[in-house]
Image (cartoon, grey):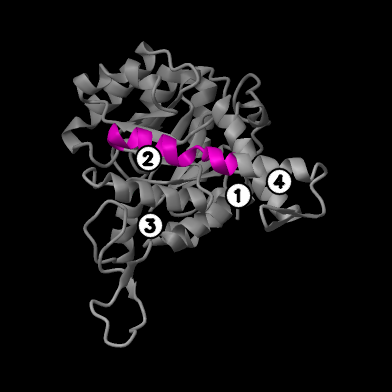
Amino acid sequence: MKPPRDFFKPLAIGAPVPLTSLPIRTERMIHFVPPHIEKVRAKVPQLISQVDVVLGNLEDAIPADAKEAARDGFIAMGQENDFGDTGLWVRINCLNSPWVLDDLMAIVPALKDKLDVIMLPKVEGAWDVHYLDQVLAQLEAQAGVSKPILIHAILETAQGVKNVEEIAAASPRMQGMSLGPADLAASRGMKTTRVGGGHPGYRVLADLEGDSLPRPAFQQDLWHYTIARMVDACQTYGLKAFYGPFGDFSDPEACEAQFRNAFLMGCAGAWSLHPSQIDIAKRVFSPDAEEVAFARKILDAMPDGTGAVMIDGKMQDDATWKQAKVIVDLAKQVAA
Ligand code: GLV
Ligand code: MG
C-alpha cells in the first residue's frame, strides 16, 4: 500500500496548520441539505445553531440537471453564513462522475478555510483517497488555503468494506467514515429497497416451547457486521465512525433504535436527512446522564485507574475504568 503523503511537506506554498492542532469537534449529526433549493438555503442560518455539522449534498438525491445549481447553491450558502463552531461539510459527486472535478475546482477556492470536510462517496480503496488527497493539495496550494481540508469516506460498496482498513489508513486527512447502507445493499446484491434500517424478513425465530403460537421472532440488525468493521478500522487509525442515513422518516422509533445500536458499538454520530432526526441524533449520541453518573463513580473509586472495586454490586477494574473514561470524556466534550 502506498504510504500516506507527509502532510507536513506538502505541495502547498506556506505552512498548513498541523492536523493535530485542529479542534476536536462534537459531530453527533451530519445534517444533509439539498443546496439547489433556495428555500432550504434560506433556513441555513437557523440550522447552524441546531446542528453540529451542516452538509451540502451534491451527490445522490440531487438530479443530474440540478448538479450545477447545487454546487453554486452550496458555495453561496458557505459564503453567506458564519458557521462558528458548526462544521461545514460537502458531499461531492463520486470520483467517476462527470461532475466531481468541477465540484472541487469551484468549491475549494471559493470557500477556502471555511470548508472543514469533504465527504467522498463510494470509496472502494485507498487509491480513491490518495487521488482526492493530491487534488486537494494542488487546489489548496493554488488558493492559499491554510487549514487542511479533511476527508470523510462513505463505506458503501462491497469492495470498500473489504478494504476498510486501508481506506482508514490512506491519508492523514482522513476524519472518519460513514456507513452508506443504501448503496451497500445494492452493491452486495441484498434483496431490499430501503435507505438503511432493518428489515422484517431479517430475523431469528425463538425456540419452540411446547405448542405456543405465534412463535416469537426477533428482527436482527442488518448492519452489525459492517458497523463493527468500520468502527475497528476507524479506532485503529484515530478516526470517527458514523452510521449513515435512515430513510423512513415516518418511523422515528426505528431510527432511534438504529442510531442507538451504532452509538453503543462505538459510532460518534449519524446522518440527519430530516429535521425530525436532529433531536434523535442529539439524544442518542450524547451520553445518558445516569450512565455518566455511574461512570464518574467508577473513575472516583479508582483514582489511578488500576485495581478492582465493587460498585452497586458490580465488579469494576482497569478495563471498566477505561470504558467509564470514554463516557465521561464524551460528556465533557458535549458539554463544552
Ligand atoms: C448513502 O449514501 C447510502 O448509500 O446509504
Ligand atoms: Mg450512497
Earlier along the polypeptide chain: callout 1 or callout 3?
A: 3
Return the residue at label 2.
271
Graded by Cα atoms within 10 Å as few (under 14), some (14 to 19) or many (20 or more), the crowding at tag 1 reads some
Between the C-alphas of marks 2 and 1, the distance is 19 Å
- Bounds of the magenta segment: 273-292
**Mark 1 residue CB less than 8 A from any atom of ligand 1:** no
The local secondary structure at tag 1 comes to helix
**Mark 2 residue CB less than 8 A from any atom of ligand 1:** yes
The local secondary structure at tag 3 comes to loop
Return the residue at label 3.
157
The local secondary structure at tag 4 comes to helix
Disc on res. 298: 4
- Residue at image position (36%, 62%) is 222
Q: Magenta stretch containing residue 285, yes or no?
A: yes
Graded by Cα atoms within 10 Å as few (under 14), some (14 to 19) or many (20 or more), the crowding at tag 3 reads many
Earlier along the polypeptide chain: callout 2 or callout 1?
A: 1
- Residue at image position (32%, 23%) is 74
Earlier along the polypeptide chain: callout 1 or callout 4?
A: 1
- Lateral position of residue 40 relative to residue 290, left or right: left
**Can residue 101 be seen here?**
no
Return the residue at label 1.
235
